[in-house]
Image (cartoon, grey):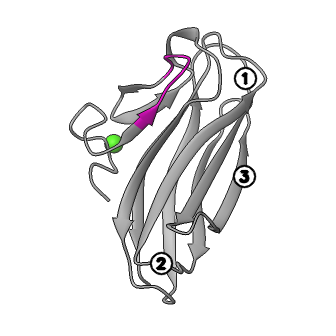
Amino acid sequence: MTNGDFATGDTTGWTLSDPVGGLLVYDQGLAFNAQNRGVGSSISQTITVEPGLPYVLTYTAWENGSGLGDHLLMAEVLNSTGLHAIVDWRLLGNGQTENVTIPFTPMTPQVVIRFTNAWASATVATDVVIDNIVVRHP
Ligand SMILES: [Ca+2]
């Protein structure tokens, strides 16, 4: 992955879909719902893989902010045929941090890794942040 740790301080390397304007890099991570914006934004990146071999997508996610909120994150790996290699849903509770590991097997030489904040119980002073996105071949 390119800039999977957001060490550049911005979204270099990622494609953004941000209809609500809630994506923002801070604290070395990518925040959804930033600036009290709503849900529905996503980031994605296309990577090259070997079809048929096992891979693992890992990332860290946490809820951040003084407000109370639960956030639902969707992580997808999409083959270039449009078929999913995996869809993973994580509900991050208020104050919760999770290190997520998602095994998948790609079917095509390129796949899209996409993260979407699909739902939140609140978005004022509560964000969901992701960081350290890595794809490896165990
Ligand atoms: Ca980082």
Residue 99, quarter of the rendered image: bottom right
Residue type at tag 1: Gly
Residue neighbourhood size for the residue with mark 3, other residues' Cα within 10 Å, grouped as few (<14), some (14–19), many (≥20): some
Query: Residue at the location (65% across, 31% down)?
Result: 95
Q: Earlier in the sequence, mark 3 or mark 1?
A: 1
The residues colored magenta run: 16-22
> In the drawing, what numbered circle is on residue 20?
none
Residue 27 x/y as whole percent? 36, 29
Q: Is residue 76 above or below residue 12?
A: below
Query: Residue at the location (73% across, 17% down)?
Result: 122
Question: In the rendered image, which residue does mark 1 sit on?
Answer: 69
Residue 102, quarter of the rendered image: bottom right
Residue neighbourhood size for the residue with mark 2, other residues' Cα within 10 Å, grouped as few (<14), some (14–19), many (≥20): some
Residue 82 x/y as whole percent? 59, 63
Residue 37, quarter of the rendered image: top right
- Left/right placement of residue 7 relative to residue 23 reads left
Query: Residue at the location (27% across, 45% down)?
Result: 13
State the CA–CA distance, disc 2 to disc 3: 23 Å
Residue 19 x/y as whole percent? 54, 21
Q: Which of marks 2 and 3 is nearer the N terminus?
A: 3
Q: In this view, does 96 lie above or below 104?
A: above
Q: Is mark 3 on a helix, strand or loop?
A: strand
Question: In the rendered image, which residue does mark 3 sit on?
Answer: 89
Question: In the rendered image, which residue does mark 2 sit on?
Answer: 108
Marks 3/1 in contact by CB < 8 Å: the verdict is no
Residue type at tag 2: Thr
Q: Is mark 2 on a helix, strand or loop?
A: loop
Residue type at tag 3: Trp
Quarter of the picture containing the N terminus is: bottom left
State the CA–CA distance, disc 3 to disc 1: 16 Å
Q: In this view, does 74 lie above or below 32?
A: below
Residue neighbourhood size for the residue with mark 1, other residues' Cα within 10 Å, grouped as few (<14), some (14–19), many (≥20): many
